[in-house]
Amino acid sequence: MTLSARLLESLAPWRDAPRWHLALSGGLDSTVLLHLLVSLAQREALPPICAIHIHHGLQAAADAWPAHCREVCAALSVPLQIEYVHVAAGASLERAARDARYAALATRLAAGEVLLTAQHRDDQAETLLFRLLRGAGVQGLAAMPTSRVLGLGLLVRPLLSCSRAELQAYAQVHALRWVEDPSNGDEQFSRNYLRRRVLPIIQKRWPHASASMARSAAHLHEAGQLLDELAQQDVSAGAETHGLAWLELPCLALPALQVLSDARQRNALRYWLRPLTAMPDSEHWAGWRSLRDAGVDAVPVWKLAAGEMRRSEQHIWWLSGDWLHMPALSNAAVQGDQVVVLPGNGSVRIDGMLPAGNWQLGYRRAGEQMLLPGRGHRDLKRLLNELGVPVFLRDRLPLLRLDNHVVAIANLPGLHGAHDGSWQLQWQPPSSDQGLS
């Protein structure tokens, strides 16, 4: 089967997309993909095709690449957009550049649109070997998926079954011009070292090594899907209600996890945590065991890259963003029918008119009590404990005081307003979206 026919076959699931965007670096791989797409469009009904070039500004040679991409796209009558991005300084320049590139590309995708990138079979083999050397698990060793969600659309890699040699041969037959990235020869970058030093030795002994490694990555991808299906079942079993639906924080019931084997617990938690934070390494999972096995009265915390996991009332909770810092708010005078923004803690709304008096909004103080009809004065700490309010939440709950006495606790049924229903204290907690990756 020709390269063109294989490309058309791999793109079949996305023929009805509203638009195809091509990530065009100007190098060999993306130039070949662009030429193939334009050739196919001359005889097949394909979505509109446009190209996007990302300029990182990391080296002087790159300044000439936008002009080259303009020439190539003009010759093929393909619209081109050029995005200039800033690469944040960090330990891994490769990763920072990749993150900046994909962030910029994601902003260009409207709902249902597809971004095509030109990674091929040899790239897949490099990715597998690179991640193997870093000790990756099944999900990591699945390497690059054929497609994944990106922004409002999808990222698709239609050339993963094609070798670099096939792309080079195609470029030579069609006399294509492309740019060479000088950094590709810099062996201080791990991928370049693998590509230039390690893989040639492997392929000399095993000529079909790249194809075999790509096949292994496909097997691992399938295994990862099966593990995800198992994790979905286990996470669903732990997604019981806890009476605090308004909190809108990721939460799992601990007993549902405790009945599973250690390996199955980790599998479920990896699946649950994947959209929230970077995965912990093998040694860091000791933090999970400490949190899981802590005494009933303990308040354990497992700190992860983008947030932390807390255990309270036989549930585990994911906290990130504003939830990682205690809010600072001195008593603020309030009136009825108003919304008050709480620094670092969402906002509260007072529904209804408050009677005349010295009303103040604040947080819990040590030793504070609340007068309950028919029950007398109750210590707030014991009251919140009886109601099963998670420990991490108790000092964040907004309180309403009248003449320095607590008369309402936001959102808690029976405690959040006047007994005759004339007014209520409603709290909109901060979002945990800051922890999403």
Image (cartoon, rainbow, N blue to C red):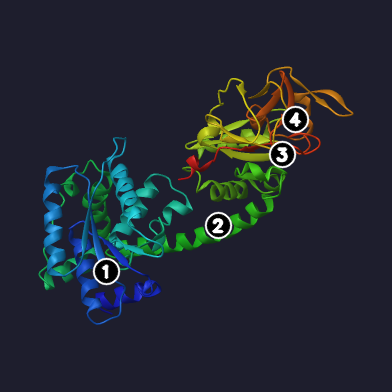
The outermost residue toward the bottom is 43
The answer for how far apart the CA atoms under marks 4 and 2 are is 37 Å
Q: Earlier in the sequence, mark 4 or mark 2?
A: 2
Secondary structure at numbered mark 3: loop
Check disc 3 and report the residue beneath it.
314
Would residue 148 appear left or right of 257 to someone viewing this image?
left
**Residue annotated with mark 2:** 228
Q: Residue under circle 1?
A: 49
Q: How many marks?
A: 4
**How far apart are the two marked residues, 3 and 2, measured between alpha carbons?**
24 Å
The foreground one among 243 and 282 is 243
Whole-number angstrom distance, CA of label 1 to CA of label 3: 53 Å
Residue 298 vertical placement versus 116 (above, below): above
In primary-sequence order, the first of circles 4 and 3 is: 3
Q: Does the CB distance between marks 3 and 2 fall below 8 Å? A: no
Q: Which residue is mark 4?
A: 384
